[in-house]
Image: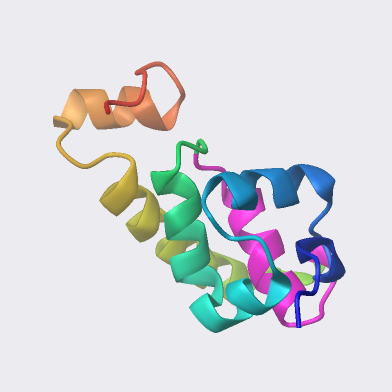
Amino acid sequence: MDTPITDIPNLGPASAKEYARAGITTAEEIRALGPDEAYRRLLRSGTRPHFIGYYVLVMGLQGRPWNDCQGAEKAALRERFDAIRAECFDAGLGELETILNQIGVVARKS
């Protein structure tokens, strides 16, 4: 079955375009990859990391509204997001560049 990505709660047409650019075109693919690997592929395709984009994906895969994530659960997701971002986006940067990158000052290295 080829269910559109937009069938996952919280993911709209803009998200579907970003995932397609990463080579992910169906909801089944996202579910099979899981949120961490799907988001990792998104970052590796050039999408800038954004915590809300990550946790809305996690919530959507659980069938929950995006704003249902709070407290300790949100803190744990932030740790997972930070690890994925560091692996895909901050790799090879020095400490100062990493900090500047986190606030959007340093351009992504290819």
61 relative to 34 in the view: left or right = right
Where does the image place residue 43, in percent across and percent down from the top left? 45, 46
Where does the image place residue 82, in percent across and percent down from the top left? 39, 54
Is 57 one of the magenta-colored residues?
yes
Tag count: 0
Q: Residue at x 67, y 64 (%)?
A: 57
109 relative to 52 in the view: left or right = left
Q: What kind of secondary structure does the magenta stretch mostly adopt?
A: helix
Q: Residue at x 37, y 57 (%)?
A: 84
The one of 23 and 103 positioned closer to us in this rendering: 23
Q: Residue at x 76, y 75 (%)?
A: 2
The residue sitting at the front extreme is 1
Where does the image place residue 91, in percent across and percent down from the top left? 21, 42
Is 33 situated above or below 104?
below
Where does the image place residue 19, in percent across and percent down from the top left? 61, 52
Report the span colored magenta.
49-67
